[in-house]
Image (tube, rainbow, N blue to C red):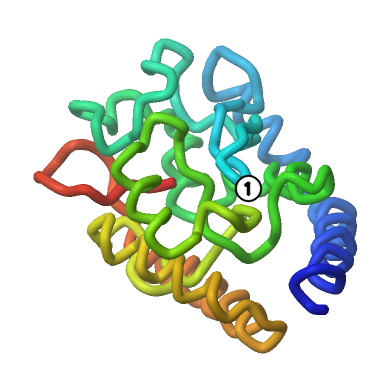
Amino acid sequence: MYERYVKRILDFVLAVFGLVILSPLYLIIIIAIKLDSRGPVLFEQKRMAQNKKSFKIYKFRTMRIDTPHNMPTHMLVHADSYITTVGKFLRKTSLDELPQLLNILKGEMSVIGPRPCLMNQKDLILERDKYGANNVKPGLTGLAQISGRDELPIPVKAKYDGEYCRNISFGKDIRILFGTVTSVLKHDGIKEGKATNTNAKRL
């Protein structure tokens, strides 16, 4: 009952509430991005939706317009050189993810769920297949994000996603939501660029 009906209602209500309450912050971020660098305010990228379909995810643009598109940040050499001044702050605080409230409003994402991966991240997709984690709606945040985020290797990240998908409940969603707030405030698990040999990345 919760997963099929209640979760979508809560997603819609939270997305509308967030867009209204955070509208002044949106305006400040938009102005800051436009003053900081050339290019659009929003960054759109194709990601994998529920049941391996695709959708366009929205983010505030944090990188220069000459950054290779559809390239995971961890695969970029000297990724920091592509990130704008305002972008560094947005990524550190995860404020660049706020436009995904629009994806939630449209029903493409949920507040809580596995982070939507790139369509070409075959290794992560195959690992998630083992746990049925590709069959649920992707989320703004999830169990993997409060359990290590970028520091997690892909098999471990997929296992956390699978654990969430097997036991979706209101109580677990609330714990993940509050855990996300704590992780964001502490800047836990954020890594940028191809600094080491790792299978993890910032999604």
34 vs 124, nearest the viewer: 124
Total numbered labels: 1
Q: Is residue 197 left or right of residue 95?
A: left
Rendered position, 84 above or below 124 = above
Residue identifier under label 1: 50
User: Would residue 145 be visible to someone looking at this image?
Assistant: no
Question: Which element is circle 1 on?
Answer: helix
Q: Position of residue 99 (x, y in %)?
A: 70, 42
Q: Label 1 amino acid?
A: Gln
Q: Position of residue 172 (x, y in %)?
A: 61, 84
Q: Position of residue 177 (x, y in %)?
A: 62, 75
The furthest residue to the left: 197
179 vs 25, nearest the viewer: 179
User: Would residue 140 be visible to someone looking at this image?
Assistant: yes
173 vs 186, nearest the viewer: 173
Q: Is residue 31 left or right of residue 125?
A: right
Give the class, few, some or many, for how many residues have Cα within 10 Å of label 1's Cα (few <14, many ≥20).
some
Q: Position of residue 72 (x, y in %)?
A: 35, 33
Q: Quadrant of residue 16 in the image?
A: bottom right
At 10% across and 45% down in the image, what residue appears? 197
At 53% across and 66% down in the image, what residue appears? 142
At 67% across and 48% down in the image, what residue appears? 98
Q: Quadrant of residue 145 in the image?
A: bottom left
Rendered position, 32 above or below 40 = below
Q: Is residue 153 left or right of residue 39?
A: left
Rendered position, 102 above or below 33 = below
At 23% across and 58% down in the image, what residue appears? 153
Give the position of the N terminus as an image quadrant. Answer: bottom right
